[in-house]
Image: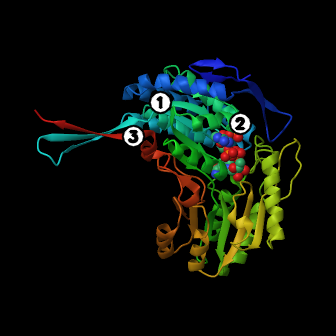
Amino acid sequence: MYKNLINGEWVEGARTTRNVNPSDTRDLVGEYAQADAAQAREAIAVAQTAFSGWSLSTPQQRFDVLDAVGSEILARRTELGDLLAREEGKTLPEAIGEVARAGNIFKFFAGEALRPGGELMPSVRPGVGVEITREPVGVVGIITPWNFPIAIPAWKIAPALAYGNSVVFKPADLVPGSAWALAEILSRSGLPKGVFNLVMGPGSQVGQTLVDSPLVRAVSFTGSVGTGRRIINSCAARQAKVQAEMGGKNPLVVLDDADLDVAVNAAVQSAYFSTGQRCTASSRIIVTEGVHDAFVEKVLAKLRTLKVDHALKAGTDIGPVVDEKQLAQNLRYVALAQTEGGKLAFGGEVVERDTQGFFQMPALITETTNAMTISREEVFGPVANVIRVRDYEEALATANDTEFGLSSGICTRSLKHATHFKLAAQAGMVMVNLPTAGVDYHVPFGGSKGSSYGPREQGSYAKEFYTTVKTAYTAAG
Ligand code: NDP
């Protein structure tokens, strides 16, 4: 039984939940505590008390904690990757990669803790000096989704602590295992009691309590658009800081002059790997007509070689869908795309394997338009559609014709088109001759339009959210 962490103590929840392996539903990963609203309030109060001490901690103390956490995560990447693959369903190499990313993020923010910076400048008035400094915000509520069970918590928790905040962390109900393992490492890192608290439990109770509590001064959320928008509104109403990373409908443009092997690799990688369960997945592939048929043929040839199976089996390219509900959602979108006129060129069906899991073949839907539902809404599964366009201008207009703006990609050998696309793509991240998914840990991450709200996450830009600015004036003499 895995418990919640409140004020440095492991405590039972109001109930428990079963964490089940989506590659094999007979495999129970563990029983995890479920907090209720009262326990969430207790964690918030504890974090509030602990804030006063931690906000005054030295850069060295913060560095030591974060560096130790990063080192342990990196040293245990295979074991933690195994746990992650088992509870979430991405393949073992993908899961180990995610764990390593989490370790590197802690290392990066250990360094950031030593570089708080500040500005000193003369006043416009004689004999007065001005200092501009950054201060921690207070108690930060962190709410994370199931698709990156350790990397997303890491890229929120590490900067929160590095800049002197205390944390109440609520992971996704579906995948509490990696979150618990991270909390366990943090519990031995030298952090004072109550600075970091873990409250596993339902979003409607535990998450909502974090969003509504006047003691929680900032909420960092990643997840669905619907939940994200509700959280943004609630936090704005009580003037709390809020940062939300939500969905995407990320386009990958392939032009006639693209290197087809590069384009096919970028499309298959970002549409289907990690079972398509990435907010940066390219689910809309926009291809100019001169290369459309050859591109589709090559994607189909590649798809025929991919193995869908148990996430921990050697040689698996695509693991299972995370659960039954997500699988049903994927199947609904595949059916709807055909009803609206798309052609199912490959896959999409549920397949059986040696173990009882949620296995779905990657689906490629061709002959689609940008107006169809499949081009408008995030599926969040191994499902992509191809849209045929005349030329670069139509490709760009189609890529931008979406309410989202997270990641946008182009495959081309033309410097002119690549340069123009980087300027004109309405997205927070632009990729040239690369998959739309797969980003570095030391630079900002986030989107425009309906995909994101609030300051950027990751890299040194994270300080914008996790600190507030103070301007102090001193008269000389
Ligand atoms: P949600 O947005 O519902 O969940 C994300 C996080 O928010 C979870 O920790 C969840 O808790 C929590 N939460 C839920 N309700 C509230 C609330 N009222 N107040 C505060 N926190 C809350 O996404 P799901 O995980 O349910 O996934 C649903 C769909 O969202 C997916 O099918 C996919 O389409 C999309 N999605 C998009 C992601 C992205 O990065 N773009 C990531 C994950 C999902 P709990 O787990 O307990 O419900």
- Front-most of residues 63 and 48: 48
Q: Quadrant of the C terminus?
A: top left
Distance from disc 2 to disc 1, alpha carbons, whole Å, reads 28 Å
Disc 2 under 8 Å from ligand 1? The reply is: yes
Q: Which picture quadrant has residue 63?
A: top left
| Mark carried by residue 173 | 2
Distance from disc 1 to disc 3, alpha carbons, whole Å, reads 24 Å
For residue 55, say whether it is visible: yes
Check disc 2: other Cα within 10 Å, few if <14, some if 14-19, many if 20+: some
Is label 2 in a helix, a strand or a loop? Answer: loop
Q: Earlier in the sequence, mark 2 or mark 3?
A: 2
Q: Residue furthest top?
A: 9
Distance from disc 2 to disc 3, alpha carbons, whole Å, reads 31 Å
Q: Residue at x 80, y 43 (%)?
A: 310
Q: Position of residue 20 (x, y in %)?
A: 79, 35
| Mark carried by residue 301 | none
Which residue is denoted by mark 1 in the rendering?
A: 67
Disc 1 under 8 Å from ligand 1? The reply is: no
Check disc 1: other Cα within 10 Å, few if <14, some if 14-19, many if 20+: many
Which residue is denoted by mark 3 in the rendering?
A: 468
Q: Earlier in the sequence, mark 2 or mark 1?
A: 1
Is label 1 in a helix, a strand or a loop? Answer: helix
Residue 2's place in the image compared with 212, above or below, is above
Q: Amino acid at mark 3?
A: Thr
- Front-most of residues 208 and 439: 208
Q: Which picture quadrant has residue 23?
A: top right
Looking at the rendered image, the disc whose residue lies closer to the viewer, 2 or 1, is: 2
